[in-house]
Amino acid sequence: MLTALLLIDLQNDYFPGGRMELVGGPEASARAAEALALFRKRGLPVYHVRHESTYEGATFFLPGTEGAAIHGSVRPLEGESVITKHYPNSFRDTDLLAQLRAAGVERLAVAGMMTHMCLDAGVRAAADLGFDCLVLADASATRDLVFAGRTIPAGQVHGAFLAALGAAYARVLTVAELPALLAD
């Protein structure tokens, strides 16, 4: 089963000094970089997805800004696919599905940001499209959210979304667990 690595929105605005800093972003990108090195070493396909905010009033991932660039820890190499999206779902109005199908990809190892938004939307869409999904929990990050006047800490948001994905859409694991699965 051909497995590809899908890196979603590991972009500068999510890191310290960016316009939408996440909790644990540098640590998650370090784990994503480990997964990326593993896929490159094994000659497996890698797909980078980056978000550009084109809606009126957007405050981050603005086209042409350094904040919208892919973070240096996971910078694409020449020949690696980079898909630009404008919605949380990486498949919406992009050629990601066509690229994956053309390459014969059947399984996706997914890492990225934000766990509760674009990672979640992309994994659910991928599963609905028939891909076997592996979510790299330690290579993903999110932020605190506010609901009903109270703050939900990022760790709880991250855990709740990973638990939901693990219930029906994906196998949730760590980057350290990934090499054994790539032997399949």
Image (cartoon, rainbow, N blue to C red):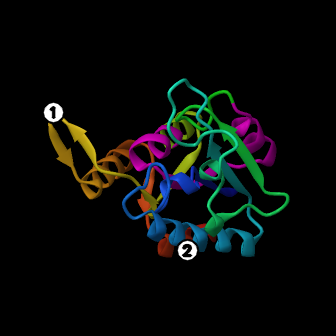
Which SS class for mark 2? Answer: helix
> Mark on residue 180?
2
Q: How far across and down, in percent of the image, does residue 82 sit?
A: 74, 49
Q: Could you tell me the amino acid type at mark 1?
A: Ala
- From the image, state whether disc 1 or disc 2 is nearer to you: 1
Tag 1 residue: 148
Please give the name of the residue rendered at 61% of the width and 39% of the height, measured from the top-left corner: 62
Q: Could you tell me the amino acid type at mark 2?
A: Ala
Q: Which residues are magenta?
A: 94-122
Q: Quadrant of the N terminus?
A: bottom right
Farthest residue toward the left? 149
Q: How far across and down, in percent of the image, does residue 89 sit?
A: 55, 35
Q: How many marks?
A: 2
- Displayed quadrant of residue 45: bottom right
- Residue 139 painted magenta: no
Q: Is residue 32 visible?
A: yes
Looking at marks 1 and 2 on the same chain, the residue that comes earlier in the sequence is marked by 1
Q: How far across and down, in percent of the image, does residue 11 sit?
A: 58, 54
- Residue 97 painted magenta: yes
